[in-house]
Image: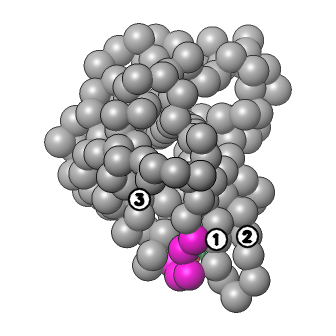
Amino acid sequence: MTRRLESRSVEETFSLGERLGRVLEPGDFVGLDGQLGAGKTLFARGVASGAGVPLDDVSSPTYSIVQSYAGRLALHHADLYRLSGEVDLFATGYFDLLESEGAMLVEWVSQVKGARPDDALSIQLEVLPLDARRFSISAVGPRAAALLSRWLGPAPTGA
Ligand SMILES: Nc1ncnc2c1ncn2[C@@H]1O[C@H](COP(=O)(O)OP(=O)(O)O)[C@@H](O)[C@H]1O
Ligand SMILES: [Mg+2]
């Protein structure tokens, strides 16, 4: 099931991220996709802030590929935009981080086959008119389902 939300402003996107960051637990995986400028990094900054990471520490890891932050928990923030495949990703230590304590927040996760673990929360951002954004959110696996429900409440029942 995919849950959809809309954000109407920068503040709303940040605060959605912040709410997710507050309930993030070690081992959680959040993958973000969406065109350049969709708001992945803005949302990720919200998540980091909610997880207790000082905002000065958080930027876009486009060049560094992976950045690790210390907040209420360890948070690893990656951006796979510049990678062409799994081999590149191995070299960054990404798969070691997946095995480690800490939560993962990965922009452009669909760029690299194999980057998303079996249990993952996936968020697709789309740009709408008037600075709005649509979030399409799906949880695969028990851990991601639990995270989603801590974040947004239990799944709505019915059609
Ligand atoms: N509702 C919104 N949600 C997210 N970003 C927005 C929104 N409205 C405008 N923006 C702007 O869109 C840009 C998103 O940039 P960024 O988060 O770096 O995107 P990405 O990481 O997806 O490339 C920022 O300049 C931000 O100010
Ligand atoms: Mg970005």
Q: Residue furthest left?
A: 72
Label 2 SS:
strand
> Which image quadrant for residue 131?
bottom right
Q: Is mark 3 within 8 Å of ligand 1?
A: no
Mark 3 sits on what residue? Answer: 17
Tell me, yes or no, whether the highlighted magenta stretch contains residue 124. Answer: no
Residue 65 pos. (x, y %):
59, 35
Q: Residue furthest front?
A: 158
Residue at 73% x, 75% y is 128
> Which image quadrant for residue 56?
bottom left
Question: Label 3 vs label 2: CA separation?
Answer: 17 Å
* In-image side of 149 versus 44 (left or right): left
Mark 2 sits on what residue? Answer: 127
What amino acid is at disc 3? Gly
Q: Magenta segment, which residues? A: 6-10
The image quadrant where one finds the N terminus is top right
Foreground pick, 7 / 158: 158
Q: Is mark 1 within 8 Å of ligand 1?
A: yes
Residue at 27% x, 33% y is 25
First in residue order: circle 3 vs circle 2: 3
Label 1 SS:
strand
**Label 2 with label 1: CB-CB less than 8 Å:** yes
Foreground pick, 19 / 43: 19
Q: Is mark 2 within 8 Å of ligand 1?
A: yes
First in residue order: circle 1 vs circle 3: 3
Foreground pick, 22 / 90: 22
Label 3 SS:
helix
What amino acid is at disc 1? Arg
Mark 1 sits on what residue? Answer: 133
Q: Is residue 151 visible?
A: no
Question: Label 2 vs label 1: CA separation?
Answer: 5 Å
Q: Is residue 50 visible?
A: yes
